[in-house]
Image: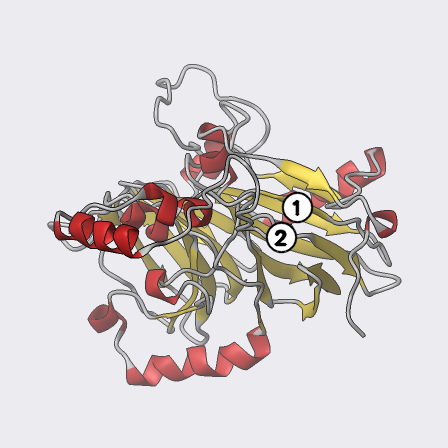
Amino acid sequence: MNAYDDDRIGRARVTDSPELLAYYDELAELDAGALWTVANGIEPWYPQPSSVPVLWRYQELRPLVAKALAMVKAEDAGRRVVMLVNPGRREHSAVVGLLYTGLQIMGPGESMSAHRHAASALRFVHEGTGAWTIVDGQKLKVGPGDFAITPNGTWHEHGNESQDAPVIWQDGLDIPLTNTLDANFYEIHPELHQRPGPVVNSSVLSHGANLLPYGLAKWTRPYSPVFGYPWEPSYQALRNLAQATEGSPYDGVIMEYTNPLTGGSVMPTMGAHLQLLRPGQATKAHRHTGSVVYTAAKGRGVSVIAGQRFAWQRGDIFCVPSWAWHEHANLDQSEDAVLFSFNDFPVMRSLGLLREEACPEQDGHQPVPA
């Protein structure tokens, strides 16, 4: 069935006439229009994302990211980031749907000034051991594979305390969403920098061990009190879960980074997952509303997205548009593959728009052109 089929009763199927065309011109003069001329386009039978599946290879991007170090001062740019832009979402600077991502590089000893914005942000570290961020006065040190959040409205600044190597981490934000809602704000800290508290990684030390601290002031903010999720315990949690369950037929062994106080997503507009594919494992295809950005955190594999095959290895980034069939496979027969991902599922869930279905054909797999 054509997505904009107009031959069924209940759909717009008005035939234009000279009188109607003149009528449309009269409406346009008053900044008005006839719904039936656009109804089938704005109310499709199923989601029609303009985003397309794309894979960005880290080894191709990294030299260009590093090249910016000598050409652009971080403070002149605000943040020295190479953004990844979906061909179908260029006007929004979006990687997929209403999500943004980019690779930020910080040279040895560099630090950025503090700012805040209405958009929520997250970080996934690709390389470098000197990275730090300060979020509302809490200093957090992060390394490769670590995941960190910068909730909307929080003051934050970043830096690299290493003296001999750059840091490259991946930013993820909901900037296209907040701009689409005409709700974005941006502020520079009045002192340019924050005064961090005396304890580094205090949010991880307080809330990051599956036990809730007793006697502390009640946390009432709509995002996680944990600002950092280190790689090692997260990966170990995946391995532990893999011993206890077969996992999902569509995602392998998958876990969500959560707010430990609610069990919900880390932020109101973006969620994040870590998933493990066992050696040689191939998942079945499914699709859902909501967009996803994947990063290969470990190993190598292939994903089939909307019938297209994308081979990936550690560091590569790829996207799955809303309602696109997708499935994953680990190409290594002896080692795990791990995918980090972030998404807009919390928005879909809050608005009652989250929907999912399994591929019913070919034993759950998509046909892939030779």
Determine crowd level at label 1: few under 14, some 14-19, many 20+ residues with C-alpha closer than 10 A.
many
Would you say 228 lies left or right of 313 here? left
Report whether 357 appears left or right of 187: right
Quadrant of the rendered image containing residue 297: bottom right
Q: Residue at x 59, y 48 (%)?
A: 323
Secondary element at tag 1: strand
317 vs 207: above or below = below
Amino acid type, callout 2: Ala
Percent across and percent down for residue 362 are 86, 52
Seen in the picture, residue 318 relative to 5 is either above or below; the reply is: below
Mark 2, residues whose alpha carbon is within 10 Å: few (<14), some, or many (≥20)? many
- From the viewer's side, name the closer residue of 20 and 349: 20
Find disc 1 in the rendering and name its residue: 287
At label 1, which amino acid type do we have? Arg
Q: 241 or 128, which is in the foreground? A: 241
Rounded to the nearest angstrom, the CA distance separating label 2 from label 1 is 5 Å
Front residue of 4 and 288: 4
Circles 2 and 1: CB atoms closer than 8 Å: yes
Q: Is residue 142 above or below residue 109?
A: above
Q: Which mark is residue 324?
A: 2
Q: Position of residue 6 (x, y in %)?
A: 52, 47
Q: Nearer the viewer, residue 291 or 272?
A: 291
Q: Is residue 235 left or right of residue 78?
A: right
